[in-house]
Image: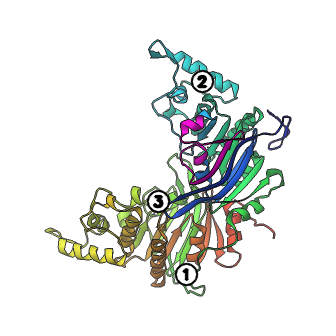
Amino acid sequence: MYWLPLCRKTHIRVFEMAIAIAAKNIYKSFPGVQANQDVSLSVEQGEIRAIIGENGAGKTTLMNIFYGLYQPDSGKIFVRDKEVHIHSPRTAINLGIGMVHQHFKLVPSFTLAQNVVLGIEPHKAFLIDEKQVNRSVRQVSEQYKLPLDVEKLALSASVGEQQRAEIIKALYRGAEILILDEPTAVLTDQEAEELFVILRNLAQQGKTILFISHKLREVLAVSDNITVMRQGKVVGTVKTSEATTCELAEMMVGRETVGGRLRNSNTVFGEVILELKGVSVLDDRNLMAVKNASISLRSGQILGIAGVDGNGQEELIEAVMGLRPVVEGDILVKGKNVARTSTRNIRETGVSYIPSDRYKAGVATDAYVWENMIASDYYRRSFSNWLGLRTKDINNAVKGLIDSFQVITPGTKTKTGHLSGGNIQRLIVGRELGFDRASVVIASQPTRGIDIAGTEAIRKNLVEYANRGAGVLLISADLDEILDLSDQVVVMFEGRIFDAGIVDEGIRIRIGNLMAGIEEGCSS
């Protein structure tokens, strides 16, 4: 079974069609989340199938089920028309399924060839045969037209080279079905185009590709068919040759809003309280993650930043909080430029910060609850003096925050890491909002992984803060949350900010277009 290429994205099949992999009525839930709901799809051998959708649509969960990282609650998986039970990645590999994750899993101190054969190394006597390692990996590299410097250390390899090594690793183990999770998220434009050439070559040789992405122009360029997922369900599958970015964006985003608006559309805002002027920021790879971004947030306003994760939102917020250097531009809080000052100084101007990763940036898990509650305020006169910490005052304040924000904990001297994720999030929100002095609130994914009651409480807290005159900058991958809370929405796409306007009847379509990189909008 193979393909004859006609052009960039069109192929003629000259073999009998066969189903390579299929899912039937798959359900998968996690605490508080129905990740997959009655998901069914089938992919033919030699096909490049794109799976697209917003964050939380269920794409990666389904692929992890195919690869044996998760087990479905119910439903069936078929590989080459035979029902299978994929208990682990080892089972998946034995069935000819390989997966390349968004975050590569290479050992930095090993060569690329050593990474490819890791765990199944060829031996000579009792030692690994390094010559055979390089020879066998080079052979696979040449067979599939995947150029690779087999002797280069992984830590010295470019992102594109690391990705090719991951693909070769799967092919080396006999993969006939390749799953790629957001494969272009870490690539430059040139590296992405090189990847597309590789994928087309693999499809021509009969490999089946499942390509998870949110970049519509890319999937239109490389895929044969596109399956759209939303809120854990398959919305539909369309032929790439018959699809448009506008139609796909509408399928991804949908039209119905879950929940309800918490904001009064007639709210009057005050003066500009946070302003970004032409801000540019580098990511950890020294690539420009934020490009000439400008935002104005007024007192009493909730400004939502929508967009698929990885478009520069995290780097932007880290720059605002002084956690990442600003390459160009200014950040003004109440008219004071804080672009190149410390996080403590920024907080002193009246900025509170609810980070997206509660464990990485929100709390110290080994510290006590009371220590995390005053982590930003321990030096203030209300909590300390020249003799040290005022333990009685701290204890009273912390107990008040625990009650007000419904943090379930055995006591203030409990290790924070022993709390549930939801209660840790309540702790963070209590610390950032409970002392009632912030004039700017930066809330990044504030309800991620929180139950319904906790989500409602946190959203009401943010709205109450805005009602009292604070400006709230809300960053969320949950579009419904953005629409329920925000007065105005901007969209981040590939590091740039685009204004979607005030929240009205047409806002969802405008956001969907901008999230897909369609600046000019779509005609109805």
Quarter residue 430 falls in: bottom left
Residue on which the image places disc 1: 262
Can residue 78 be spotted in the picture?
yes
Q: Position of residue 148 (x, y in %)?
A: 61, 28
Question: Of the residues under marks 2 and 1, which one precedes in the sequence?
Answer: 2
Where is 371 relative to 173, above or below?
Answer: below
Residue 464 versus residue 438: which sits nearer the camera? 464
The residue lying at 39 percent from left, 57 percent from top is 359
Q: In which quarter of the image is the N terminus?
A: top right
Residue 468 sits inside the magenta stretch: no
Q: How far apart are marks 2 and 1 (CA)?
A: 57 Å
**Image disc number at residue 318:** 3
- Label 1 element class: loop
The residue lying at 26 percent from left, 63 percent from top is 414
C-beta proximity under 8 Å, tags 2 and 1: no
Q: Where is residue 517 in the image (x, y as percent from the top left)?
A: 70, 59
Quarter residue 364 falls in: bottom left
Q: Give the range drawn in magenta.
A: 64-93
Residue on which the image places disc 2: 137
- Label 2 element class: helix
